Image: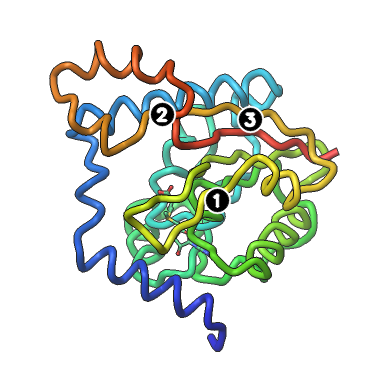
């Protein structure tokens, strides 16, 4: 694939893997587990309020699915494995996903060109994907493809950083205005979640007390979670 942004993203994720950055996100850390529970609760509430639950019979695509865990979590909310699709640029992550979840469908492709017909999906998920894409043209192309494959009345479920990360030059925060620009005409419901991860991970046994208190300080919430409905 002769696309410099594709090559850049692949190189960055290879470096993450070599640096074992995934260790940071282990669920054994109580702070990470609290971040996960808060995100799942918000996603469940938003999907429920918009009439998408249960997920049985809904066709769902995750763009930038990595090894498929976010998608697999949807099984708990009634999704059928054969209705779940994931795409990612990274060959090794897609291979892992296929081994872990053989009933789901995974493709190693650039989401600027999705191998699916128009209006195939009820839901398209973007979980920390646009923050990994620094090239404005790729962001536009990926958004346009997601809009194409989404049914009218369908929705995008969004979760991503809203701030830049001063310790990681390979990601860029995505603000509300950016989301509105990428998906014009969509009905957007957005909330802020996720207590600053490097802080939340330090709480240890005090997490059940500290997380709910500190998450009330809005500037400490680093991510947006949202639902964008296609009219
Ligand atoms: C931070 S990871 C998130 C993985 C998963 N969504 C999760 O939340 O665990 C971002 C993923 O987006 C993928 N990605 C970025 N740009 C992409 C593109 N143009 N096409 C397909 N995948 C892309 C990356 O390869 C990476 O696996």
Instruction: Decide: few, some or many residues near mark 2? Use Cα within 10 Å; few <14, some 14-19, many ≥20.
Output: some
What is the x, y in percent for residue 85?
55, 53
**Label 1: which residue?**
62
Q: Which is in the foreground here, disc 3 or disc 1? A: 3
Q: Position of residue 82 (x, y in %)?
A: 54, 48
User: Image check: 20 left or right of 160?
Assistant: left
Q: Position of residue 30 (x, y in %)?
A: 21, 27
Marks 1/2: CA–CA distance:
27 Å
Return the disc, 3 or 1, that comes first in the chain's sequence: 1
Q: Decide if residue 38 is on the left or right side of residue 174.
A: left
Does the numbered disc 1 mark a residue whose Cβ is under 8 Å from ligand 1? yes
Q: Nearer the viewer, residue 99 or 150?
A: 150
> How many angstroms separate mark 2 from mark 3 (CA)?
16 Å
Seen at 70% across and 41% down, the residue is 122
In the picture, measured across the screen, residue 211 lies left or right of residue 10, that is left
Q: In the image, which is nearer the foreground, mark 2 or mark 3?
A: 2
Mark 1 or mark 2, earlier in chain: 1
The image's mark for residue 23 is none
Tag 2 and tag 3, C-beta contact below 8 Å: no
- In percent of width and height, residue 190 lies at 63, 30
Mark 3 vs mark 1, CA separation in Å: 19 Å
Mark before the other along the chain sequence, 2 or 3: 3
Indicate the quadrant containing the C terminus: top left, top right, bottom left or bottom right.
top right
Instruction: Identify the residue shown where x is 33% and y is 61%.
Output: 96
Q: Is residue 191 above or below residue 83?
A: above
Q: For mark 2, give the secondary structure.
A: helix
Determine the residue positioned at 68% across, 28% down: 189
Q: Which one is closest to the eye, mark 1 or mark 2? A: 2
Q: Residue at x 76, y 53 (%)?
A: 147
Q: Viewer-proximal residue, 58 or 231?
A: 231
Q: Which residue is mark 3?
A: 190
Residue 220: mark: 2
């Amino acid at each position: 694939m002769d696309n410099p942004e594709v090559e850049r993203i692949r190189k960055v994720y290879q470096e993450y893997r070599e640096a074992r950055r995934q260790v940071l996100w282990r669920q054994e850390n109580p702070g990470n587990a609290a971040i996960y529970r808060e995100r799942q609760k918000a996603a469940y509430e938003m999907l429920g309020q918009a009439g998408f639950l249960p997920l049985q019979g809904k066709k769902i695509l995750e763009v930038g699915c990595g090894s498929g865990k976010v998608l697999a979590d949807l099984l708990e909310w009634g999704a059928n494995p054969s209705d779940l699709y994931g795409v990612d640029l990274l060959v090794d992550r897609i291979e892992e996903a296929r081994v872990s979840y053989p009933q789901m469908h995974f493709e190693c492709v650039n989401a600027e060109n999705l191998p699916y017909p128009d209006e195939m999906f009820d839901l398209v998920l973007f979980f920390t994907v646009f923050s990994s894409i620094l090239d404005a043209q790729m962001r536009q192309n990926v958004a346009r493809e997601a809009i194409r494959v989404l049914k009218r009345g369908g929705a995008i479920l969004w979760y991503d950083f809203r701030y830049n990360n001063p310790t990681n030059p390979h990601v860029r925060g995505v603000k509300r205005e950016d989301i509105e620009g990428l998906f014009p005409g969509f009905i957007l419901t957005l909330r802020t979640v996720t207590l600053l991860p490097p802080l939340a991970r330090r709480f240890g046994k005090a997490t059940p007390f500290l997380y709910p208190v500190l998450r009330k300080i809005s500037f400490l919430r680093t991510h947006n979670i949202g639902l964008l409905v296609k009219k």
